[in-house]
Amino acid sequence: MPKRALLLGLKLAVSAVLLAWLWTRFDLAAALERIFTMDARFAATAFAILLLHGVWSAWRWRTIVRALGGALSWTEAMRLFFIAMFFNQTLSTSIAGDVARVWMLHREGATVGAATSGVVLERVAAMLALIPLIALGIGLLPGPIHPGLWALVLFALGCGLALPLAATLSGSSTAGLATLGRFAAAGQRILLSARGLLVFGQSLLIHLGAGLATYLLARAAGLVPDIGLCLALTPPVLLLATLPISFGGWGPREAALIWLFGLFGIAAAPALAVSVALGLLVMAAGLPGGVLWLSRTARTPSTG
């Protein structure tokens, strides 16, 4: 428990320090004005896309679970995925939702190994689909590409692949290697098949939706950015937000988006406004999961 409390304190400190630095370094008043005067039509459309982002992600997860031989209905997949989204936003670790999905799917009858393989494979499929999308988006960006952009993208992709694999190997080395072996076999069987094309298409749809939501928030804040810029830069920014170094991604997401937008001439204040609005809408999109979780626990009889 003290170790967990220490980790939580460190994550809160990272978020607080980064946000405090950003808000003292840049024009906070201008950023807040941008947020409070955002075009409600663009912001509402961005929120609707983020809700659909959860639905599409649940669809991809269900596709993979069923390919592994599991039984997962549409409604159950969406219910469990939105609960996981809620945990990602409210607990101290960004992989809490993944752990919750494994646990809940196991409660539904799947083995721990199969449930873990489904979640890890879904994460890896998302990372693999990002590679061509980001490469295409960066290739279409105007002007010379800052070397730091490639470094940030490679770092985000590397961490995005390493985290689920590290979770797979956690615990005893024997059990971890056995799970990793099952995951590798399942990945080869699913991703290199016709169903893998469906998963790849689902992943592209999800990533494009996230980029479009950022673009719409930028428009809501009065900016007119290149849509390709948002499609290329949003995925690595959201990947950085999932790293277990902050609370809910607050701080790293804002710093990354300000820096990346700044490379293409977008001022810090509107970039900060877009990032904060994106974080708030992502949190709001996870709230239905909290309601679903409370209703689930209310229906579950006490065993005490």
Image: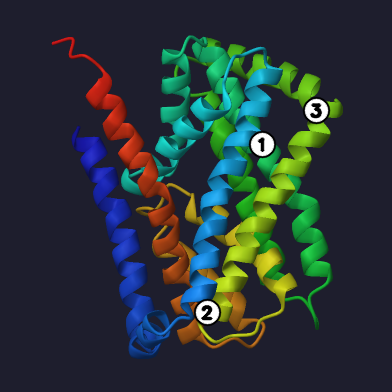
Q: Which mark is residue 195?
A: 3
**Which residue shows up at 79% across the image and 19% down it?**
189
> How far across and how far down the image is residue 3, in percent?
24, 36
Q: Nearer the viewer, mark 1 or mark 2?
A: 2
* Distance (Cα) linking label 1 and label 2: 32 Å
Q: Which residue is mark 1?
A: 124
Residue 263 visible somewhere in the drawing: yes
> How far across and how far down the image is residue 101, in percent?
46, 28
Q: Is residue 58 left or right of residue 130?
A: left
* Distance (Cα) linking label 1 and label 3: 15 Å
Judge the density around disc 2: few (<14), some (14-19), many (≥20) Cα neighbours within 10 Å: many
Q: Secondary structure at mark 1?
A: helix
Q: Is residue 128 above or below residue 262?
A: above
Type of amino acid at the residue the image marks with label 1: Val
Pointer 1 or 3: first along the chain: 1
Type of amino acid at the residue the image marks with label 3: Arg
* Distance (Cα) linking label 3 and label 2: 37 Å
**Which residue shows up at 64% across the image and 47% down it?**
158
Type of amino acid at the residue the image marks with label 2: Ala
**Which residue shows up at 58% across the image and 46% down it?**
159
Pointer 1 or 2: first along the chain: 1
Q: Quadrant of residue 119?
A: top right
Q: Secondary structure at mark 3?
A: helix
Task: Kindly check if marks 3 and 2 are in contact, taking CB atoms under 8 A apart as contact.
Answer: no
Q: Which mark is residue 220?
A: 2
Q: Nearer the viewer, mark 1 or mark 3?
A: 3
Quadrant that contains the N terminus: top left
Q: Secondary structure at mark 2?
A: helix
Q: Nearer the viewer, residue 108 or 126?
A: 108
Judge the density around disc 1: few (<14), some (14-19), many (≥20) Cα neighbours within 10 Å: some
Quadrant that contains the C terminus: top left
